[in-house]
Every structure is written in C-alpha cells, then in structure tokens.
Image: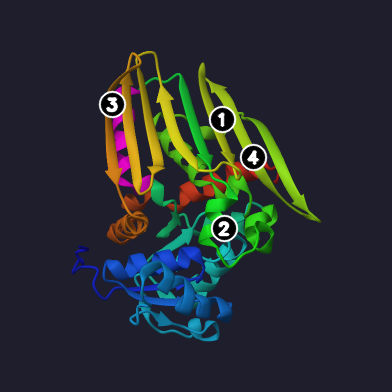
Amino acid sequence: MNIINKNLFMKKVLIFGSGSIGNHMSFACRKIGLKVFITDVNSKALKRMRYVIYPSRYKNWDKKITIVDYKDVFKLKDFFDLIIIGSPPDTHLKLYFDCKNKLKYRRILIEKPISNFSNKLLNKFNNSVKKEMVFCGYNHSVSKSFVFFKIYILKYFKKYKTLEINWKEGWEGILKAHFWLKNEFESYLGNIKKGGGALQEHSHGLHLMLVILKLLKVNYKYLKFTKNLLFMKKGNVRYDVYSNLSTISNNSLINYETDLKTFPSLKNITISNDNYKLQWKCNFKSNKDSVSLFHKNRLKFTKIFKKTRSTEFENEIREILSINNMKKRNKSSLNSVYGINTIQLIRKTLNEK
C-alpha cells in the first residue's frame, strides 16, 4: 500500500512528453499524491497515452491527471513545484529555456540524457543552470540498492584495481516500452544526432561511473579513454550499437561497455582490489537488484532489493522535491552537473566539439 506524504499532497507537477517516460512519471507522481498536468506537442501522442498506454500499464486512466493542449501550456499561470521534461532528447534544452522564460516553477527535472550530444544550446545551458534547481533523470543513482552499494565502496575501496561497468540491453526490451514504434529508426532512438544510440540511450551506466569516480576522488576529465564503437546505419541515419571505453588510471583499470543487442539485459557494476570484490546488479531478476561482497574470492553476503518500476521514479521525485537549496542540490547525484558531464563525455567520445 502506498502512503501519500501530506507534505507532497496537492503540489503541482507539469510534465512535457506523453511517451514511455511521461507515463511512468505521471503514474509515479500520482502515487505520491502530486497534482499532475501533462502536455505534448503531438496531440496524437496525448490521445495514445490517455486511451492506450496508461490504461494498459496501470489498469485505468487516472481522471485526476489534467491534459493540457500544447498551444495553451505556456499561458498557464499556475506555480509548479516541479516541471519534468520527458520529450525526445533533442528537444530538452529548447524546452528548458521556454519554461524558464514563460512559466513559474521551483525545480526542473530533465530526463536522461540531458540533451543530444550535438545540441548547440549545451554551453548556454551549462552557464544557465549553475545556480538553479535543475536535475537530470538518472533514477538508478538514488535506488536503495545503489545507495547501499556506495556505502560499501567507501568502506572497502579507498584503493581499487578494477572498475567494470556493463549497461547492455537490446531493442527487444526498449521497443516493448515503445510498442507504437515498428523499429528504432522511427524515432530518435535510432538517430545518434537526436540522442539515440547506445551511449546516449543507455547513459545511465556512464552517469553511475562518474558518480563512483567522484567517490573514489578520481577526476574523469583527466582520464584518456581508448574507445571502440560499432555503428548501425539506415540511409543517412546511424547510431552506435556497441560502445566501449577503457583506460588505466594510477595502475587501475576502468572499463565501460554498452550495447543495443544483448538480450536479456545485462546491467551491473563491479569494483575490486587485492582483498575485496563488490558487485551491484540492476534488474538481475524481474523487479530485483542485488549487491554482493566477496573477500578473497569468498562470498561474504548478497543483499536483494525488491522494487517496482514505479518505485524507481517515486524515489527520484521524492528526492528532488526534498531539495530546497543549492547546497543540497550539489550533493545530489541527480543534479544537472552530472547530467552535463555525462553528455560532454559522450560528445568527446563521438568526436563532437
């Protein structure tokens, strides 16, 4: 049974985008008692959400969700406690500036990746958000399992020998969540310039890598990665189907792999030194994460974390709404700095200046 926090009740949230993430966010916001408004530049997408996606995922349409015609959204006079931008990545930054100039709000959450890697507004955005309550939607970083994982990194890994990150999921799972698409090329998902491809669509893994490197007091900007990328192409449109980044830092190996072919998905992080190995597994079974610690190759423990798809987003929204000053924002793994650093690393990898 979900308990509604009275402090959140009747707070207003405006969501841009009625695709897969817009539905997840709407449901999660309603579960914790928020008043939801949603809009989309595509009126057919709003209708699909209302009559197909939301009822099929959550049994019934929630009549307390207010659908706003896009032509009217920037005329709204309401004050929003949170604005969520969940539209395609290449629209994120323009929407951010539109919201900043035309709407009243306290916080903005931009879904990952924070933009497509080639977005010309990225530098302007970087300067704009330095002192603003802007966040990026890397929800795995605030999951109970990953928070637990970080505790043990700090406890046993002041020094490490290897850090390995796998974030691999084929199109089967992704297109299941976007069932209205025949294939990846029908949307931004199959277009690297619009924010698609393995590095951008699966940027959760890179973001978590940056969070861990900060814990280890490693500045990723000084790391020189060797890269290996493979591409799929249809006409003039292409995306990276496989990407690998690796480097040696102070005699320690960092290796990151992501792809859009692995099925079932494989998402895990392993860190090791001479005595210990610690592994975090995301969705190793349906609605379950795990953390395992080994000492001298002997298992000390495995802790299982049960979850639902909705709780992942609920945790994210609760954390953001609990942050009311820049000091707290800067400490959060959801803060926009991590989102910007992640897409800048992707930009560098894809040779985009």
Q: Magenta residues, as a range? A: 141-157
Residue placed under numbered mark 4 in the picture = 242
Q: Is residue 242 above or below residue 192?
A: above
Circle 3: element type = helix
Q: Are marks 3 and 4 in contact (CB under 8 Å)?
A: no
Image-quadrant location for residue 344: top right
Q: Give the numbered dot on residue 222.
A: 1
Find residue 155 and name its label: 3
Place of residue 314 in the rendered image (x, y in percent of width and height, measured from the top left): 32, 59
Indicate which disc residue 261 carries.
none
**What secondary structure is marked by label 2?**
helix
Dot 1 or dot 4, earlier in sequence? 1
Dominant secondary-structure state across the stretch colored magenta: helix
- Is residue 74 visible in the rendered image? The answer is no
Which mark is first along the chain, 2 or 4?
2
| Dot 1 crowding, Cα within 10 Å, few <14, some 14–19, many 20+ | few
**Residue 225 image offset from top left, x and y in percent:** 61, 30
How far is the residue under mark 2 from the one under mark 1? Answer: 37 Å
Please give the label number shown on residue 175.
2
